[in-house]
Structures are given as C-alpha cells and as structure tokens.
Image (spheres, rainbow, N blue to C red):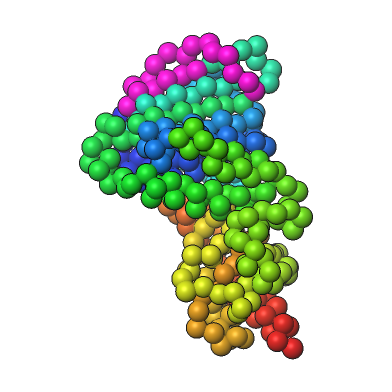
Amino acid sequence: DTLINQIAAGEVVERPASVVKELVENALDAGATRVDIDLEEGGVRLIRIRDNGGGITPDELPLAVSRHATSKIASLDDLEGVATLGFRGEALPSIASVSRFSLSSRRADAGHGSVLEVDGGRVGEITPKPHPQGTTVEVRDLFFNVPARRKFLRAERTELGHIEEWLRQLALARPDVELRVTHNGKPSRRWKGEGDLLSGTRLHEALGEEFARNALRVDHAAAGLRLHGWIAQPAYNRASTDQQYLFVNGRAVRDRSVAHAVRQAYSDVLFHGRHPAYVLFLELDPRRVDVNVHPAKHEVRFRDARLIHDFVYRTLHEALADTRA
Ligand code: ADP
Ligand code: MG
C-alpha cells in the first residue's frame, strides 16, 4: 500500500505548497476559524498545520491516513455536488507515504487528545497526547524516502514563494479565517479574520493599494449564476497574468474558458493589450460543475461551459462599458 500511496503522491504532492494546500483545506473542511502554519526551510524540513476545527476521534485516526477513506462523501450521488474542498481521501495517505508524518487531534467532547505517527508510510500506534480542540498535522523531511522527487525541490525561497502564493489565494477565498504563518521560527505573515473582502483590508494586503484603488467592483447574478469580485481598470494592468484569481464555489481554479471570457471583455471595451488583474468569484449549483477532474483539483469542468463563458463575458463587458460612459 505504501507504494500505491507513493505513486498517488506523485499526482497530489508536487512540492511543499501542495502539502500546505491539502492540509489547510482539510482544516477548513473541519470548520476551522484559525489556522497556524509553521514552516521550516521552505516547508521541506517542516510543515506544521494546526487548526481549531472539529477534530478527529482516536479510532478514526488510522482511517484518516488510509487510502480512499474520506468522511466527506458517502456515495456517488454526493460526488455530483461536492460542497467540501476534499473528497478523494488520498491526500493524507499520500503525504504520509513520502514524509515523517504525525496527526494529532482532539474533539471537543474527548477528554484528551491522541496522536498517530506514520514514517514513510509505516503506520504506528495511536497514543494519548495532550492537544487543544482541533488537529495538528506535522510533515517533516518531505520526500526523504523518494530521492528522485526530492531532487526536483527548489531553493528555500522558491518553495516558500509557492506556499505564499497559494496562501494569498486562500486569504482571498476565506477572509473569515485567521491565518498565522511562521518561517524558520519567525512570524512571516498574519491574516486577521474578517467578515468579508468588502469590509476588511485583505484585498489591499493581498494585491496591493494600486490594485484596490483601480479595482472595479462587479456583482451580477442571472440564470442561477453569480459573478462577483473586482477587475482592475486600465490604469492598473499587468505585463503578465500574475494577478488573475478565479474562484469557483470558493475553490481557486484555473480555467481557460473563463480566463478567455475575461480577457475578451476587457480588450473589447478597453482595447488594451496588457493583462487585466482580477479577483473573481463564480458561484453556481455544485451539480453544474465537476471538481473531480484532476487529483490536485486545480481544474474544474463546467457542464455548460459555453453559457458560463458568455455570462462572464457579458457581465464584465457591461461593467467595464459603464465606466466608459
Ligand atoms: P479528503 O479531504 O479527501 O476526505 P484527506 O486524505 O485529505 O481526504 O483526509 C482524510 C480524512 O481525514 C478526511 O476525510 C477527514 O475525515 C480527516 N481529516 C483530515 N484532516 C483533518 C482535520 N484537519 N480536521 C478534521 N479531520 C481531518
Ligand atoms: Mg483533504
């Protein structure tokens, strides 16, 4: 099973940033309102994620690290309308097969916490351990037992940069969750929990004052679709696509068709060759979008892609044209 998990890890766990993503998503699925992220050496030496979510009972700890055991969906029907970030049940076993891993947790109703250690896929015993309500996952020495993958890891700064970029996406998607990040023992970033992106300072902090000053607010709903967020006006556009954030039902994704619709609306109205910066949230019935396209879940497939393309195009075209009138 360790070998199968290691093979799956090849798809789910590309680098420290993918581990951070999977673990923080689990924390959010568990209802956490605060997540502490401690990193050492760009996450290669250590990734420790602690949350204040619902926690795991001792007898469920082994299940959490076994393959395709997910507590989030019970049937194929559920897969049709996934509401949680996770559902494949392969992140923890994959990560645990390529690291020195420990999972500690306590549910609110339990007298004490428990810990389960997994060393390169070898699962140990469940032992009692004091722990506040919630869960802590520790991942040490990523890829220590897979030299072929370890050699693809980049410099500390590069790996940290990937983690920070993903955390920025998360900060935009979940302004209500407090995030505290340390690197090599020093505080590196703190996102305070806020009501939403409209009321707080997160948008500024994530994308800069320039973006916030030039951002046009968009919010439009029709035919069971809602698009809201911000698109920057021409005074602030970019030489690259680095500030293009799309969230579908709260999940950060890349989608060529939606990206095309945005670019098209932007250039049709503003006749501008550079790249628009944007933070856009598309919301729709989860049954209209398939999130189970790739193990890392960076992509989605829309059941009616054409309709969504046109909706995004028209919404932004109208909003941008209004600023010209
Ligand atoms: P998935 O998220 O697809 O269900 P994972 O391998 O990421 O699969 O996690 C396996 C299971 O472990 C989850 O379904 C959940 O029951 C449990 N789990 C993992 N992380 C946490 C956490 N931080 N808090 C509570 N439960 C967790
Ligand atoms: Mg998960």
Horizontal side of 275 relative to 211 (left or right) equals left
Does residue 135 sit above or below 39 in this rendering? above
Judged left or right of residue 66, residue 59 is right
Is residue 81 in the magenta section? no
Question: What residue sits 56% from the left and 52% below the top?
Answer: 168
Q: Quadrant of residue 306?
A: bottom right
Q: Where is residue 27 drawn, in percent x and y? A: 58, 36
Residue 142 visible somewhere in the drawing = yes
Quadrant of the image occupied by residue 271: bottom right
Q: Residue at x 65, y 59 (%)?
A: 204
Q: Nearer the viewer, residue 314 or 151?
A: 151
Does the image show residue 78? no
In which quadrant is the C terminus drawn? bottom right
* Front position in the image: 150 or 238: 238
Q: Who is closer to the viewer here, 34 or 304? A: 34
Residue 156 on image: x %, y %: 37, 44
Q: Where does the magenta region start and end?
A: 115-133
Residue 307 placement (x, y as % from top left): 60, 73
Whether residue 128 appears in magenta in the rendering, the answer is yes
Give left or right: position of 14 versus 70. left
Compared with 38, 123 (above or below) is above
Q: Residue furthest left?
A: 148
Q: Residue at x 58, y 49 (%)?
A: 170
